[in-house]
Image (tube, grey):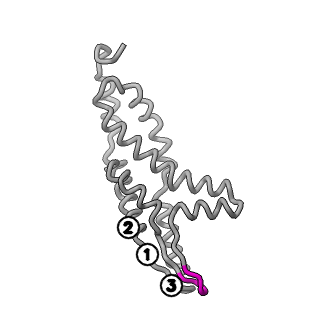
Amino acid sequence: MSLAGLVLFIPANLLPLLTFSLAGYSGENALYTGVLALYREGFIWLALLVFLCSMLAPLLKLLALLFISAGSSWPPLRDYVAAALRKLEHFQQWAMLDVYMLGVLVALVKLGDLGDLGIANGIYCYAALMLCSTLAAANFDAEAIWLRLDAMSPQELPA
C-alpha cells in the first residue's frame, strides 16, 4: 500500500484537483498551487503548515512505511529501521490528507452556487492516495516489527 501511495503521490499533488469558472475567470487548482498562492500573498507560516501537513508529512510517512516494511528483514538495517519506526509516529500525526480532502469537498459545496466548479483528474489520484495511506497505516503492525528487530541476534549485525 505504501508503494502504491508513493506512485500516486506525484499525480495527486501536481494534477489539478478542481476546475472552476467564477465571474468570468476560469482556472484549475492543484495542491501545490494553493501552497504557492498562500506564500505569494504573504502567509508564509500558513503556506509552510499546509505544505507540511498535506505534502511533506504524507510523503515521509509513506517512505518510512516502505523502508520499515522492506528493511525490517535485513539485519544490517536494524538500527536504521528502529530509528525510522520511532519517527513514523511523528509523521502520522502531521499527515492530514483526509483534512485536506474535507476542505476540497466543503469548497465544492460552498462555492458551487457562485459559479461552475468541477472535479479534475487529480482529485481521483488524491482520493486513491488517501485510501492507500490509510490502508498502509491500518495494516502496519509496529509491534511485529519491533519483535522482528529484537529477534535479530547480535551475530547477524555488522561489526
The C terminus lies in quadrant: top left
Circle 3 is placed at which residue position? Answer: 116
Q: Please provide percent x and percent y for residue 23.
A: 61, 86
Q: Quadrant location of residue 85?
A: top left
Main SS class of the magenta portion in the image: strand
Image-quadrant location for residue 122 = bottom left
The residue under label 2 is 124
Q: How many marks?
A: 3
* Residue occupying the point 51% across, 73% down: 28
Residue type marked 1 = Ile
Give the Cα distance between marks 3 and 1. 10 Å
Which residue lies under the disc numbered 1? 119
Secondary structure beneath disc 3?
A: strand
Q: Which residues are magenta?
A: 21-26
Instruction: Give the distance between the C-alpha atoms of the residues marked 2 and 1, in whole angstroms.
Output: 9 Å
Taking the image as shown, residue 142 lies to the left or right of residue 49, namely: left
Q: 124 above or below 89?
A: below
Q: Amino acid at mark 3?
A: Asp
Within 10 Å of disc 1 (Cα), the crowding (few <14, some 14-19, many 20+) is some
Tell me, yes or no, whether the two marked residues, 2 and 1, touch with CB atoms within 8 Å. Answer: yes
**Residue at disc 1, secondary structure:** strand
Closer to us: 137 or 32: 32
Q: Amino acid at mark 2?
A: Tyr
Are the residues at dot 2 and dot 3 in contact (C-beta closer than 8 Å)?
no
